């Protein structure tokens, strides 16, 4: 689960991680009032969407204009910036060309930045350790830094038995070239950031940029991702979810506890098991097709869940064919068949449907599909299924054209 920048900074402040003062605003009027309340000679108005690169982005209604982060010296400038952003679609390198509508703003104090850094906390699966990362290359795409100048990324792996210790934080501060009061501020920053990450069951906390203001280290921007499986322990964090920022199909899938990610292709996939889902998408591409989604119904899905999953796939107008690929271990093939039949009849299936079943109750499931009266294309194995769904989808697309 993702949250907005202003929400992230509120969480950081609770753990004494320094952030500039700021006030969220849900309207132009609230933005102007927030600037008045801050009383700063320099104010920053920031669009709030679940995507990075807001400052370098552009609005669809004004492609050549300013982006989603603007410095303002007067209340009139704050009002103009808020009016230019609120309700408009912001396009960044992370949103794709469709962009996202700005429905919230964050008005913050302008600060005198002496130096920008990068900092993040994440789980490194290679070492099975929570790892603190820091770099002097703040404000940049960290993937580019890792590719072009990996020596500028410094890491500290933390033993879960001991948790973070002052020497961990000092090692990173030294690597960033900090000393004196700035080093003390950085040590406090790193230790509190780590504790925030662990206590809140985050999957990643990214501070980009982390900045030096005078002799104090602060988080100028912040990004949190949370482990969905741990949200039952954090009702307050779950309440921060902004459904308007989510893909409607992904939101619907979440209601049924389905793992769904929308993609750009035209072949819908319904699979049980994340590994099998990845393999299915790979083999579709191998045979010249493009997957429209990742969808894992899980090992214990009911017919109701399968029906919901099938309807979610078909709600994507780009889907021109569907591949159902099930290996029945915990999941029974007849349950999948029941859900597919129910959903196909309810939505009046109009695209090619290829089904490959294997495992528990496979013969029963195949019989149900064969006797359903639906135009289902049976497949013997995964390669056969991929070849058939790609061919059928291309044929259907050509016929429609």
Image (cartoon, helix red, strand yellow):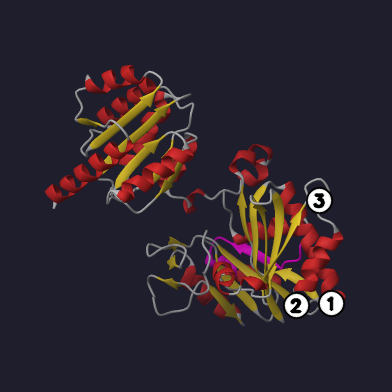
**Magenta stretch containing residue 22, yes or no?**
yes
Residue 86's place in the image compared with 273, above or below, is: below
Local secondary structure at mark 1? loop
- The Cα–Cα distance between marks 1 and 2, rounded to whole angstroms, is 14 Å
- According to the image, label 1 marks what residue? 179
Q: Where is residue 76 drawn, in percent x and y? A: 56, 79
Rate crowding at label 2 as few (under 14), some (14 to 19) or many (20 or more) other CA atoms within 10 Å.
some
Q: Where is residue 124 drawn, in percent x and y? A: 65, 53
Q: Residue at x 42, y 71 (%)?
A: 59
Q: Where is residue 92 drawn, in percent x and y? A: 46, 68
- According to the image, label 2 marks what residue? 213
- Which sits earlier in the primary sequence, circle 1 or circle 2? 1
- 217 or 379, which lies in front? 379
- 259 or 392, which lies in front? 392
**Magenta stretch containing residue 117, yes or no?**
no
- 191 or 101, which lies in front? 191
Callout in the foreground (1, 2): 1
| Residue 163: image tag | 3
Q: Residue at x 50, y 35 (%)?
A: 257
Range of residues picked out in magenta: 16-31
Rate crowding at label 1 as few (under 14), some (14 to 19) or many (20 or more) other CA atoms within 10 Å.
some
Q: Would residue 117 be seen by someone viewing this image from the given angle?
A: yes
């Amino acid at each position: 689960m993702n949250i907005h920048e202003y929400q992230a900074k509120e969480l950081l402040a609770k753990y004494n991680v320094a952030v500039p003062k700021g006030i969220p605003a849900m309207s132009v009027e609230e933005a102007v009032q927030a600037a008045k309340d801050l009383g700063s000679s320099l104010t920053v108005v920031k669009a709030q969407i679940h995507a990075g690169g807001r400052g370098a982005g552009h609005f669809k209604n004004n492609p050549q204009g300013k982006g989603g982060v603007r410095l303002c010296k007067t209340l009139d400038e704050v009002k103009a910036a808020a009016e230019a952003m609120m309700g408009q679609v912001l396009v960044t390198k992370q949103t794709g060309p469709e962009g996202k509508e700005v429905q919230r703003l964050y008005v913050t104090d302008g600060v005198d930045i002496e130096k920008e850094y990068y900092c993040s906390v994440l789980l490194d699966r290679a070492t099975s350790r929570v790892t603190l990362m820091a770099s002097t290359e703040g404000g940049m795409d960290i993937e580019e830094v890792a590719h072009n100048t990996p020596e500028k990324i410094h890491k500290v792996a933390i033993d879960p038995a001991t948790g973070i210790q002052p020497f961990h934080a000092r090692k990173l501060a030294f690597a960033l070239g900090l000393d004196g009061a700035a080093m003390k501020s950085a040590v406090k920053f790193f230790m509190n950031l780590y504790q925030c990450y662990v206590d809140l069951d985050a999957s990643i906390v990214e501070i980009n940029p982390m900045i030096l203001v005078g002799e104090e280290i602060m988080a100028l921007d912040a990004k949190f991702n949370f482990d969905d499986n741990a949200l039952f322990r954090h009702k307050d964090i779950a309440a921060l979810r902004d459904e308007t920022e989510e893909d409607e199909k992904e939101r619907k899938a979440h209601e049924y506890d389905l793992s769904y990610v929308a993609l750009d292709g035209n072949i819908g996939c319904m699979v049980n098991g994340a590994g099998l889902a990845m393999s299915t998408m790979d083999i579709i591409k191998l045979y010249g097709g493009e997957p429209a989604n990742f969808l894992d119904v899980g090992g214990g899905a009911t017919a109701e869940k399968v029906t919901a999953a099938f309807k979610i796939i078909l709600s994507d107008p780009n889907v021109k064919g569907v591949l159902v690929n099930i290996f029945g271990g915990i999941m029974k093939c007849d349950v999948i068949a029941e859900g597919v039949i129910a959903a196909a009849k309810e939505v009046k299936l109009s695209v090619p449907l290829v089904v490959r079943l294997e495992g528990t109750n496979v013969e029963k499931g195949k019989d149900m599909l064969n006797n359903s009266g639906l135009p289902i294309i049976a497949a013997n194995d995964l390669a056969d299924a991929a070849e058939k769904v790609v061919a059928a989808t291309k044929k259907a697309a050509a016929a429609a054209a």
